[in-house]
Structures are given as C-alpha cells and as structure tokens.
Image: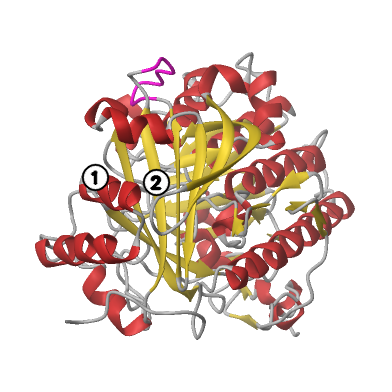
C-alpha cells in the first residue's frame, strides 16, 4: 500500500494492513476451540451446551443515533458527518489547529500539568470508560467525549462477566459479584418447553450496572455529552479533535472507543464498513416482578436456550435498573436471534416517529405492525415459555454486523473494541475484548511523554496481539453462528413483508 500526500494531508492508509488478511471466508478453519465432554470451549471459556451456542450480545447497546441504513450512501462531506480524515495540517492551517475552543462553564476540562500526556477518548460507553481508567493508571490525563445527548442510564443489555472485566472491577474495589447476578445452571428448552439442565455457575451483569461501576470512580474526569467527532488533526506532538458542534479539544493521543458506528474509524479508514451478517437480535429487558411466577421460576438462576432452524433464543437474569441483585428486584434479559433478509431491514429499523436507525432500534420505537409480527412469529416458532416472555416485553432490535479491522493504530490515534472490529456476539466477548484492548494499549503507552517519539515498537506489538485475539474470537463466533444456522444463506428466514 502506498502513501498519498495531497495538500499537506498524510493518507494514514499507507500504514494499514491489507483487509483481505483479516477477512473470514465461509468455512474458515476454526482455531482455539475444543470439545470437552459435549461442551465447546474457546481456550478455558465454555461456549457450547446441549447442542446450542452459549450466545449473547455483550457489546454495548449504545448506538441510538440515526444513520444510513445498510446499502444506503453515507452523508456527503460538508455536513456534521464530514469525514476528511486524520491529517497533519500544512503551514497555512497550523495556527488554527492549535486554537482550542473553551468548554461551556459546566463542561470545562482542566487537565493537570503533572500528567505524562493527555488522552482524548472518543466514546463514553463501557469500553471508553475502561480506556479512561487504564490510561489514568499509566499517568495520562483523560477527557471522554460521548456522541449521545441523552441519559445513558436508559440503555440496557446483558453482559456475561469475563476475566478482563473482572480484573478491572477488582482494581477499582468493586468485585464482579457485587455488580452481577449469579446463575447455577444452563438449560435447553425443546419446542414444547421441556428442559434439559446442566450445572454451570456463571455471573451476569447488565450494561447500565457496569456503566455506573466504571463511571462513578471517574467523577472528576471531563465527560462531555452530545459530542460527535467530525475531524482530527495532528500537529507535532498534539492531536486536535473537532466535534460537530464546533467544539475542539487538544491532547497528545486519541482513542476511538465509539462502537460499530465509529466516527473515529471512518476518519482513519473510510473503506472498512460494517457488513450485515444476515440476522438480527430481537431483545427484551423486563423487571422480574412483571412476570408470572411460574415463568420466573423456570428462568431464575439459569441460562436458558432454545435453537431451531434460522433462529436461537437465550435468557438470563441481570441486576435491576439501579443495580439491585435481590430477588424480586432483578431484570430478565433475553435475546432472540433470527435470520432476516437484508431488504427487510429498512422496514424493521424504522421507528414510530419515522426515523431510520442504522445499528439499533430502541425500546418503544417498533412500528405497531412490527410488534404484531414479532408476537405472531414468537407464537409459532418459540417454546411456550419464551413466546410468553416475548409477548410480555417491550421489544427492541439490533442487527448483527461483521467488521474486520485493517489496523488498530495510526500515528497518534488508536481504535479499541467494536470501533476497531466487531466479533459475532456468540462468544460473549464484545465487552471483554474492548477491556483487553484498553489494558494493552495503556501498557504500551506507559512511561511515554509527548516530548519523546511515540513508542512505536510497543504499539505495534499491542496491535499484533490484539488482532490475533480478534481473529480467534471472529473464527469462534462465525463457527457458532453456522452451528445455529444463523446468517445469510443459512437456515430459514423470517420477518419478510406480509
């Protein structure tokens, strides 16, 4: 790949790896997985039970921002979503690049001069918060910029507790057990609702519970909402981020942790785009107190599954809306993966107000006819307990996408989590991958100051290790989807136009 220098702008793609090296063709040989007495493992982590994948979307359900639907062109340059890339300004623009607009009084970021360097974290979800903690631990001053304007506490998704998350929580003095619901068994439902059970202790948490556990210790860190990244420039040892409202911030290193719809990635790599995987996740998150006692007795304390051609459903309990773990105050989290043809996505991603969403349709936004269609399909396709659960829920939806990374670091910027690349949800590793990315990146930057060159060797080593981890998870997730006949051209399809 070659560099392209035009008008003082350096094309960072000259340093990125060929995407074909990281693409996963159908039938790609699976590595790192093993079968132990009927259960499938990725390394030491169980993935498979009684003929069905241990699946979950443990990535943040945070992208409630409207955007282009799959197959539609992106917005044209010049608007709020102008994507002109990471560049080094020429002499004519040097002065303007160093001017940083002030925060409004309530949002002023005061960086200590005692910090080794200043990091701008783009994305204020749990991956971005993990990056903020890790970077502070190596001496960085940190500011976090989140594109959502509303209350983040309204987002909800189940998360399978993994070692990377557990490790950071322990360092913060908040053990995983304090923010999780403990499960004791996994159970498989058949079409009539009969069960087969297997002992398997596991901890489950929720996105909002984990968010609070990470956010509260950062109360003194600048956290700016309604901040959509528009442009990034590098000048010497400074990197300047410009946002769509005209606000600019300057630091020494930028971390893109802004999810699958990452503006940071689009600035660094305008070629890589998420590709629809051929199926969606219908979801629900309901108070356990709202469910019939017979249904709750079946689900409480268990990780419950059902699989059929072209679909899979799973369910487990998570902490309550305020982190409650006591019986009667928890929530029931469920995910129903279903094959859906891509031409049907625009209709399913259209909200009651007529807005079109790209990656996530929030609760309460499904069109009435879609609600009816979901209820009908659940009635004919799911075991009676799961059909009842869907009927009692405020359903929301997230399509499943694939995104292979090119490279995770370029100049004074790096990508972590889903901003770097997405893995299928079936390994329950989306959140833990972001946490691992953040911890490794901070370790690579430990001891660095802006008066010295970037630690290129350490960053390259971090990148190669995390890309290798990504490939392992991608292979496992792809294989688990195939086993469940999920994805384009596999299994039955549902939710077509009536």
Query: Given contact means CB atoms under 8 Å apart, are the residues at marks 1 and 2 in contact?
Result: yes
Residue 478 in sight here: yes
Mark identifier at residue 334? 2
According to the picture, the residue beneath numbered tag 1 turns out to be 393
Mark 2 closeness class: few <14, some 14–19, many ≥20 residues within 10 Å: many
Residue 12 spot, x, y in % from top left: 67, 71
Q: Position of residue 33 (x, y in %)?
A: 80, 59
In the rendered image of this protein, does residue 155 appear above or below residue 168? below
Residue 431 appears in which quarter of the rendering? top right
Of 405 and 341, the residue lying toward us: 341
Residue span colored magenta: 320-327
Q: Is residue 283 left or right of residue 219?
A: left
Q: Horizontal placement of 55 versus 114: left or right? A: left
Mark 1 vs mark 2, CA separation in Å: 10 Å
The kind of secondary structure element at disc 2 is strand
Q: Is residue 460 above or below residue 274?
A: above
């Amino acid at each position: 790949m070659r560099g392209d220098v035009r008008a003082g702008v350096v094309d960072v793609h000259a340093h990125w790896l060929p995407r074909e090296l990281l693409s996963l063709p159908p039938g790609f040989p699976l590595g790192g997985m093993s079968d132990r007495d009927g259960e499938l493992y990725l390394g030491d982590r169980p993935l498979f039970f009684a003929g069905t994948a241990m699946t979950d979307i443990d990535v943040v359900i945070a992208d409630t921002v409207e955007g282009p639907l799959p197959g539609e062109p992106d917005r044209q340059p010049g608007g709020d979503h102008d994507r002109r890339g990471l560049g080094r300004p020429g002499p004519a623009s040097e002065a303007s690049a160093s001017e940083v607009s002030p925060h409004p009084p309530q949002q002023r970021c005061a960086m200590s001069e005692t910090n080794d360097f200043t990091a701008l974290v783009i994305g204020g979800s749990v991956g971005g918060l993990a990056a903020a903690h890790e970077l502070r631990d190596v001496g960085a001053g940190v500011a976090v910029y989140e594109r959502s304007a509303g209350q983040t506490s309204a987002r909800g998704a189940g998360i399978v507790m993994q070692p990377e998350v557990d490790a950071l929580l322990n360092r913060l003095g908040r053990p995983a057990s304090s923010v999780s619901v403990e499960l004791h068994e996994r159970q498989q439902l058949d079409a009539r609702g009969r069960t087969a059970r297997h002992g398997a202790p596991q901890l489950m948490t929720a996105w909002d519970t984990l968010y609070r556990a990470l956010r509260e210790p950062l109360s003194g860190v600048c956290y700016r909402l309604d901040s959509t990244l528009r442009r990034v420039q590098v000048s010497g040892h400074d990197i300047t981020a410009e946002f769509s409202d005209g606000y600019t911030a300057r630091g020494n290193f930028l971390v893109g942790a802004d999810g699958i719809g990452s503006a940071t990635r689009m600035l660094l790599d305008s070629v890589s785009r998420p590709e629809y995987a051929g199926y969606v996740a219908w979801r629900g998150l309901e108070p356990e107190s709202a469910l019939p006692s017979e249904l709750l007795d079946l689900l409480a304390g268990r990780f419950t599954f059902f699989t059929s051609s072209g679909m899979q459903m799973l369910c487990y309990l998570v902490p309550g809306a305020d982190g409650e773990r006591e019986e009667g105050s928890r929530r029931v989290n469920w995910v129903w993966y279903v094959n859906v043809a891509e031409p049907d996505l625009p209709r399913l991603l259209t909200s009651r107000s007529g807005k079109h969403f790209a990656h996530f349709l929030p609760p309460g936004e499904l069109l009435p006819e879609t609600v009816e269609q979901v209820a009908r399909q659940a009635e004919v396709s799911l075991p009676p307990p799961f059909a009842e659960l869907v009927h009692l829920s405020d359903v929301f939806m997230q399509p499943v996408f694939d995104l292979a990374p090119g490279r995770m670091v370029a100049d004074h910027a790096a990508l972590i989590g889903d901003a770097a690349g997405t893995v299928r949800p079936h390994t329950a590793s989306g959140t833990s991958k972001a946490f691992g990315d953040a911890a490794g990146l901070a370790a690579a930057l430990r001891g660095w100051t802006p008066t010295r060159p970037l630690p290129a060797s350490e960053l390259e080593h971090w990148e190669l290790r995390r890309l290798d981890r990504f490939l392992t998870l991608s292979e496992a997730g792809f294989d688990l989807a195939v086993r469940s006949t999920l994805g384009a051209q596999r299994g039955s399809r549902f939710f077509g136009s009536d």
